[in-house]
Image (cartoon, grey):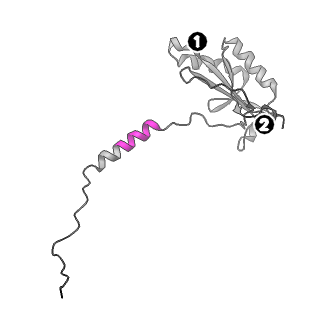
Amino acid sequence: MSRFNKKKGSEVPAVNTASLPDIVFMLLFFFMVATVMRENTLKIQNQLPVADQVEKLDKKNPISYIYAGKPSQGYEQYGTEARIQLNDKFADVNEIAAFIYSEREALREELIPFLTVALKVDKKANMGIVGDIKQELRKVNALKINYTTGVGDALSNLD
């Protein structure tokens, strides 16, 4: 009959951690490059209307966003009527010109003619505020306007 003998000195070798810092830094750089930071914090209700014939904007051209809608929860002190939001603050209609000028100043000179203003208007906002925004955009010669919508059946906007 044979005996089972334990082998002496057969320990599990230590894990080699020499390449661990390299892996950590590669992951760090990957997430730094791949992560997109949120640009604006919405202070308004922004349920976009839907449309069935939608075109996507080119990401090559610069886009400035103007939001319009009722103030959301936590911002009731601004009223219940539709308001305009430029970047992260509420604004009046007469502040749109200064906003467009500042957006143009931030661009290179050859990109200024390609600046598109995208209107993200809540579907329950009245058309008067949209007309006021368009009048101010005409005054500063910002004539490339895009209405941002979702994809769907346009008849569902009647709800």
As drawn, the residue found furthest toward the left would be: 8
What residue do we see at 39% from left, 43% from top? 28
**Nearest to the observer: residue 1 or residue 75:** 1
- In the rendered image, the quadrant that contains the N terminus is bottom left
What residue do we see at 26% from left, 59% from top? 15
Q: Where is residue 105 in the image (x, y as percent from the top left)?
A: 54, 16
**Nearest to the observer: residue 57 or residue 138:** 57
Query: Residue at label 1?
Result: 113
**Residue type, mark 1 in image:** Pro
Residue 125 position (above or below residue 3) = above
In which quarter of the view is residue 125 placed?
top right
Residue 54 position (above or below residue 19) = above
Name the secondary structure under disc 1.
helix
Q: Where is residue 109 in the image (x, y as percent from the top left)?
A: 51, 12
Magenta span: chief secondary structure: helix
Q: Does 13 sit left or right of 113 as displayed?
A: left
Q: Does 152 sit left or right of 27 as displayed?
A: right
Q: Of callouts 2 and 1, which one flags the residue occurring earlier in the amino acid sequence?
A: 2
- Residue 28 part of the magenta-drawn span: yes
Residue 3 position (above or below residue 158) = below
What residue do we see at 53% from left, 14% from top? 111
Q: Does 106 sit left or right of 66 as displayed?
A: left
- Residue 75 part of the magenta-drawn span: no
- Magenta segment boundaries in residue numbering: 26-34
- In the rendered image, the quadrant that contains the C terminus is top right
Query: Residue at label 2?
Result: 79
**Nearest to the observer: residue 149 or residue 94:** 149
Name the secondary structure under disc 2.
loop
Residue 87 position (above or below residue 16) = above
